Amino acid sequence: MRRIINYHPDRLTGLLLAMLPFVLLIAAYAVGSQARLAENADDKLMPAFATFVDAMSHLAFEPNRRTGEYVFWTDTLVSLQRLGLGLGISTLLCIVIGVPIGLIPYLQQFLNSFMAAFSLIPPLAVLPILFIIFGLGETSKIVLIVFGIAPFMIRDVTIAVTQIPREQLIKAQTLNASTWQMMTQIVFPQVLPRLYTGLRLGLGAAWLFLIAAEAIASEGGLGYRIFLVRRYLSMEIILPYVAWITFLAFAMDFALDRLSRWTCRWHHLAS
């Protein structure tokens, strides 16, 4: 008797199944919105889709009268710049710190416990401290992202390094390889897939810290705009911005997955 776990959808069926939850969510919202607007035409909680289109068209395709900027695209660019710098610095720290800690026993004894404790500090709890030290400008927002995701990525890469078979390092030493050569030619290529995975898993947290920082003290960005219009209950702006952030995060996750498959083909073939 065949069990359900042995049935696999074909390509078309799989695509339809993947799209179905989104279609159901949109349909449920449409029904709920129509019901609320039928009771109260001025309801702000669940605006009609036409209201979304009007609001976002104004923000995306009409320049601001005061600054001349296209607000939606300016907010997107500002947030992506902050996020990109935060992720880039976190990745660099992950490589520079995580790989040596996992490879060199003295560094492992010296920093492993410290990094474990450091990674447990709630990033949002130190946000006021970051504002005091770095001010309310760009630096504090980028540092918050780094503070929030870099320690976890460093720990993950450190664990990945320690899981590399010791025989490989012994063979490299018998061939007179230096520590630097082992680090760059043996260790780093093997932990690179784990690094991509860490980045993908850290994306959600990175967006969270970015939105939090922009909401508290900022002059632009997606999070800033959401919290700016909340006082007016402008759900026709808030909901599209949330959907756009979700789409950007999904696109970044997809891009990292493609990049991982392109640069680490051996890993994906093996798995």
Image: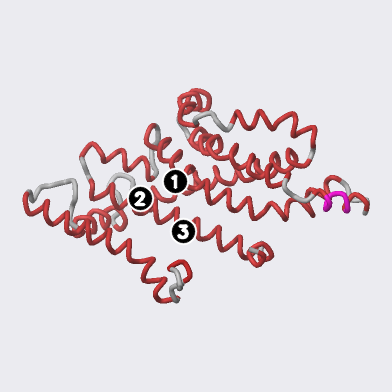
Which residue is at the front of the view, 164 or 235? 164
Disc with the residue nearer the chain's start (1 vs 3): 1
Which residue is at the front of the view, 146 or 38? 38
Type of the residue with mark 3: Ala
From where the camera sits, is residue 71 visible? no
Q: Which residue is mark 2?
A: 69
Q: Which residue is mark 1?
A: 79
Tell me the quarter of the image containing the C terminus.
bottom right
Residue lying at 28% horizontally and 50% vertically, measured from the top left = 239
Residue lying at 88% horizontally and 47% vertically, measured from the top left = 178
Q: Measure the alpha-carbon separation of dots 1 and 3.
A: 15 Å
Discs 1, 2 touching: Cβ within 8 Å: no
Tell me the quarter of the image containing the N terminus.
bottom left
Q: Measure the alpha-carbon separation of dots 3 and 2.
A: 25 Å
Q: Which residue is mark 3?
A: 251
Secondary-structure class at tag 2: loop
Residue lying at 65% horizontally and 67% vertically, measured from the top left = 269
Disc with the residue nearer the chain's start (3 vs 2): 2
Q: Main secondary structure of the magenta part?
A: helix
In this picture, residue 268 sits left or right of residue 212: right
- Point out residue 176 in the picture as x, y percentages from the top left corner: 93, 51
- Point out residue 183 in the picture as x, y percentages from the top left corner: 79, 48
Type of the residue with mark 1: Ser
**Magenta region:** 167-171
- Point out residue 90 in the picture as x, y percentages from the top left corner: 60, 42
Residue 155 against residue 265 in the figure, above or below: above
- Point out residue 55 in the picture as x, y percentages from the top left corner: 23, 53
Neighbor class of circle 1 (other Cα within 10 Å; few <14, some 14-19, many 20+) is many
Neighbor class of circle 3 (other Cα within 10 Å; few <14, some 14-19, many 20+) is few
